[in-house]
């Protein structure tokens, strides 16, 4: 059996899940459902990143211990994924024993190999981002990423020899063009590595300054840098190093999905960590774009975050899932607006899909007593009908081909091409005339093609819109239709002019 391992980043728990979290997670869910549907052995991992200074400060502000604080946040993430119909196989927390043991083992392994050394460090540190910056980078005393004030810190820490592996990583990326995707992100990482000398990575924090973290096994006075800890979740969730059965089955044939803002950690630090430890690197890393509101990136600090649960409550889960993956190419930035979502709803979902389902079931009830006829191979259909059948025959392969490239729009477009043709088929065939003229066989042939479209469209849409797919198929059980209400009643938009 073919295996497919897909991961989201583990989300930081100093805040609640927002549209950016949901975008990555829905994409991973669609790919997982699609592969399962095709018979693959799938492992879909998500989870939470629970250590570090931001969490400690958030807990202190809430008057809680760090563990109490993170335990209170986790149900909100799980509730959101449940409402979004996310079919993950594992939800890992970095405070779990399995992860803490794996991080300790990994650190000791690198230490024994001479990859970690103790040294003094003085630098400018951004607490919210948990990143050190140079004077040149931190212009005006502000963090280049979040634009908040930074602090000067001097301390003794352990450093990972990133610089020793730069030449290897650069050559690996050149030799493996599919390793980092899309191509614009690959070029971005290549340029960074060609134009900059990597500095060794500070992988610890003194326990005296930061108590909330995983202790270094060889230095109990230090805890692990949150990013170094977090990245290891991708293998600790597979049982590494205690039980390698799952690890051997799924690693390294993994697809890491993430937003472009954390590409460098995944495309530079993570592969070097694995290489230094003697482990194979991930098969593929894909960094998608950001969602914006107007001209600004969506972020908690800007106060313009879209809450997925609010959208779901208004429009439904499947509409939200469909919009995110249909409106913007995966990899590019997108602008979220209620107006754009309603336009997709009324066009693609109400006019095209919803209309096709409702009118087909209505015609069956009206013309042939609600039966679902089966297409007879000895009968000929019109040119458009034959064209539709030919598209249906190739639909699964077409969808497979583009989803392997993470082109969600193209996959949906293949389905919508058939839906569009089927709606035209109604207008061309004029089944109401066939009924008047008593052409029962031609009418049944026409409807048999329409029902084939509904069944296959529902099957291919199941990974994207699981509830909608289930509703369509529930109306086609057995040999008679069980027509329900229209799937997507049009939204009436008030004319403000």
Image (cartoon, rainbow, N blue to C red):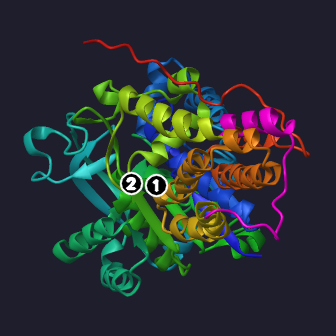
Front residue of this view, candidates 361 and 315 = 361
The image shows residue 152 at horizontal and vertical percentages of 20, 42
**Could you tell which of marks 2 and 1 lies nearer the N-terminus?**
2
Q: Quick check: is 23 in the magenta stretch?
A: no
Front residue of this view, candidates 86 and 153 = 86
Front residue of this view, candidates 209 and 256 = 256
Cβ atoms under marks 2 and 1 closer than 8 Å: yes
Judging by the rendered image, the residue that carries numbered circle 2 is 329
Mark 1: which secondary structure? helix
Q: Which residues are magenta?
A: 357-382
Q: Residue furthest front?
A: 437
Q: Residue at x 45, y 54 (%)?
A: 258
Judging by the rendered image, the residue that carries numbered circle 1 is 409
Q: Is residue 148 above or below residue 4?
A: above
Alpha carbon distance from label 2 to label 1: 7 Å
Q: How many residues crowd around disc 1 within 10 Å: few (fewer than 14), some, or many (20 or more)?
A: some
The image shows residue 252 at horizontal and vertical percentages of 59, 75
The image shows residue 121 at horizontal and vertical percentages of 26, 57
Q: Is residue 68 above or below residue 424?
A: above
Q: How many residues crowd around disc 2 within 10 Å: few (fewer than 14), some, or many (20 or more)?
A: some
Mark 2: which secondary structure? loop
Q: Residue at x 26, y 45 (%)?
A: 125
Residue 442 appears left or right of 422: right
Q: Residue furthest right?
A: 478
Residue 168 appears left or right of 415: left
The image shows residue 69 at horizontal and vertical percentages of 57, 27
């Amino acid at each position: 059996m073919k295996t497919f391992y897909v991961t989201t980043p583990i989300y930081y728990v100093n805040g609640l899940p927002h549209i950016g979290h949901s975008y990555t997670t829905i994409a991973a869910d669609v790919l997982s459902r699609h592969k399962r549907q095709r018979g693959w052995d799938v492992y879909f991992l998500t989870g939470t990143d629970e250590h570090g200074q931001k969490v400690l400060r958030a807990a202190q502000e809430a008057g809680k211990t760090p563990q109490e604080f993170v335990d209170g946040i986790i149900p909100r993430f799980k509730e959101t994924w449940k409402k979004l119909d996310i079919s993950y196989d594992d939800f890992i927390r970095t405070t779990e024993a399995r992860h803490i043991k794996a991080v300790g083992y990994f650190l000791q392994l690198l230490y024994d190999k001479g990859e970690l050394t103790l040294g003094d460090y003085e630098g400018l540190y951004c607490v919210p981002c948990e990143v050190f910056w140079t004077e040149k980078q931190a212009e005006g005393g502000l963090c280049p990423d979040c634009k908040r004030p930074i602090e000067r810190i001097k301390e003794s820490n352990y450093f990972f020899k990133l610089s020793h592996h730069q030449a290897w990583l650069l050559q690996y990326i050149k030799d493996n063009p599919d390793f980092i995707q899309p191509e614009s992100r690959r070029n971005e990482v290549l340029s960074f590595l060609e134009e900059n000398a990597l500095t060794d990575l500070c992988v610890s924090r003194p326990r005296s300054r930061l108590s909330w973290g995983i202790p270094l096994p060889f230095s109990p006075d230090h805890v692990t840098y949150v990013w170094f800890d977090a990245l290891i979740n991708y293998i600790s969730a597979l049982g590494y190093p205690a039980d390698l059965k799952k690890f051997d089955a799924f690693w390294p044939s993994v697809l890491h999905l993430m937003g472009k803002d954390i590409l460098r950690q995944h495309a530079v630090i993570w592969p070097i960590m694995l290489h230094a430890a003697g482990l194979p690197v991930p098969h593929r890393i894909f960094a998608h774009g950001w969602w914006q509101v107007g001209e600004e990136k969506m972020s908690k600090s800007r106060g313009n975050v879209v809450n997925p649960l609010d959208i779901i409550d208004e429009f439904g889960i499947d509409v939200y899932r469909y919009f995110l993956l249909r409106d913007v190419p995966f990899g590019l930035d997108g602008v979220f607006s209620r107006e754009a979502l309603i336009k997709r709803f009324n066009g693609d979902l109400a006019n095209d899909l919803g209309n096709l389902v409702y009118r087909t079931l209505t015609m069956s009830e009206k013309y042939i007593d609600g039966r679902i006829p089966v297409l007879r191979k000895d009968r000929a259909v019109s040119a458009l009908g034959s064209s539709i059948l030919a598209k249906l025959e190739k639909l699964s392969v077409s969808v497979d081909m583009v989803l392997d490239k993470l082109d969600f729009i193209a996959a949906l477009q293949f389905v919508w091409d058939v839906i569009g043709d089927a709606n035209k088929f109604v207008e061309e065939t004029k089944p109401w005339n066939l009924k008047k003229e008593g052409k029962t066989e031609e009418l049944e042939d026409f409807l048999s093609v329409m029902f084939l479209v509904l069944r296959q469209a529902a099957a291919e849409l199941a990974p994207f819109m699981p509830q909608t797919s289930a509703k369509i198929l529930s109306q086609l059980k057995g040999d008679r239709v069980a027509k329900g209400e229209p799937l997507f009643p049009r939204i009436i938009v008030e004319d403000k002019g």
